[in-house]
C-alpha cells in the first residue's frame, strides 16, 4: 500500500504524458482544466443538493441515508476530478455510476476489514501494555468515586451501612 501511494502521482503523470504523446500537448492541458472546472461545479452542486436534502429530512423528521449516499458520491467524484490525471478521472466516473460504486464499496470493505481488525487488536494490546497509570478517562471507562478509612488489621470488622429504602426514586 505504501508503494501505491508513492507510485500513484507518477502513474497520473505518466497517463497525462501518454495522452500528450498520442495527441498533442494541448489535449492533456485542456483535459485537466476541464476536469478541474467540472469537479468544482460538482462539489458546489453536491453541497447545495445535500443541504436541500438535509433541510427536507429535518422538516419530515427523518433522515434518509440512501439520499445522502448519492450526494457523498457526487462530492467524492468532484474531488477526484480536481486531482489532475486520467486515473483519478476514471475512478471518479466509476464512483458516479451506481452499480460500479457498489462494486467499489464491496472491494474497499473486503480489503479494509482485515486491516481494521488488525488495528483493533493493536489498540487493545497497546491499552493493555500501558498499564493502570493512564490519563483519566482515556479508555472511556467508568470512574467510581468514594471515601475510604484506613483500617488496622486487628480492628473489629464494621457492619455494612444500611441504606434508606424510602429515599429511592
Image (tube, rainbow, N blue to C red):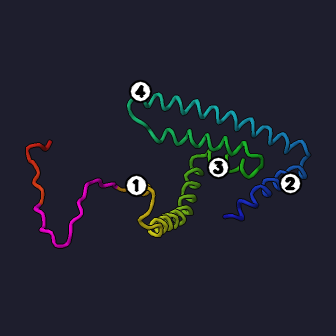
Say if mark 2 contacts mark 1, CB within 8 Å: no
Which label belongs to residue 94? 3
Between discs 4 and 2, the one toward the N terminus: 2
Per the image, label 1 sits on a secondary structure element best described as: loop
* Residue 20 among magenta residues: no
Using the image, determine if residue 27 lies above or below residue 109.
Answer: above
Between discs 1 and 4, the one toward the N terminus: 4
Q: CA distance from mark 1 to mark 4?
A: 35 Å
Residue position marked by numbered label 1 in the rendering: 140
Q: Position of residue 139 (x, y in %)?
A: 42, 57
Magenta span: predominant SS is: loop
Q: CA distance from mark 2 to mark 1?
A: 53 Å
Q: CA distance from mark 1 to mark 3?
A: 40 Å
Residues in magenta?
142-159
Residue position marked by numbered label 4 in the rendering: 59
Which mark is nearer the camera, 2 or 1? 1
What residue is shown at x 41% (from left), y 26% (from top)? 59
Q: How many marks?
A: 4
Per the image, label 4 sits on a secondary structure element best described as: helix
Q: Position of residue 142 (x, y in %)?
A: 33, 55
Using the image, determine if residue 96 lies above or below residue 37.
Answer: below
What residue is shown at x 89% (from left), y 52% (from top)? 22
Q: Nearer the viewer, residue 102 or 149?
A: 149
Which label belongs to residue 150? none
Between discs 2 and 1, the one toward the N terminus: 2
Q: Residues within 10 Å of mark 1 (few under 14, many from 20)?
A: few
| Left or right: 119 in relation to 157 | right
Residue position marked by numbered label 2 in the rendering: 18
Q: Residues within 10 Å of mark 4 (few under 14, many from 20)?
A: few
Amino acid at each position: 500500500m505504501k508503494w501505491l501511494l508513492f507510485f500513484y502521482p507518477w502513474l497520473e503523470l505518466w497517463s497525462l504524458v501518454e495522452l500528450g504523446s498520442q495527441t498533442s500537448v494541448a489535449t492533456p492541458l485542456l483535459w485537466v482544466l476541464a476536469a478541474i472546472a467540472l469537479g468544482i461545479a460538482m462539489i458546489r452542486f453536491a453541497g447545495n443538493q445535500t443541504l436541500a436534502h438535509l433541510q427536507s429530512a429535518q422538516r419530515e423528521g427523518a433522515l434518509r441515508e440512501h439520499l445522502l449516499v448519492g450526494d457523498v458520491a457526487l462530492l467524492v467524484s468532484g474531488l477526484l476530478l480536481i486531482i489532475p490525471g486520467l486515473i483519478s478521472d476514471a475512478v471518479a466516473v466509476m464512483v458516479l455510476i451506481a452499480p460500479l460504486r457498489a462494486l467499489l464499496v464491496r472491494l474497499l470493505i473486503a480489503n479494509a476489514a482485515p486491516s481494521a481488525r488488525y488495528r483493533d487488536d493493536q489498540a487493545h494490546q497497546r491499552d493493555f501494555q500501558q498499564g493502570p497509570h493512564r490519563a483519566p478517562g482515556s479508555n472511556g471507562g467508568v470512574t467510581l468515586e468514594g471515601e475510604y478509612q484506613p483500617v488496622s488489621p486487628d480492628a473489629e470488622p464494621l457492619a455494612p451501612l444500611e441504606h434508606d429504602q424510602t429515599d429511592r426514586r
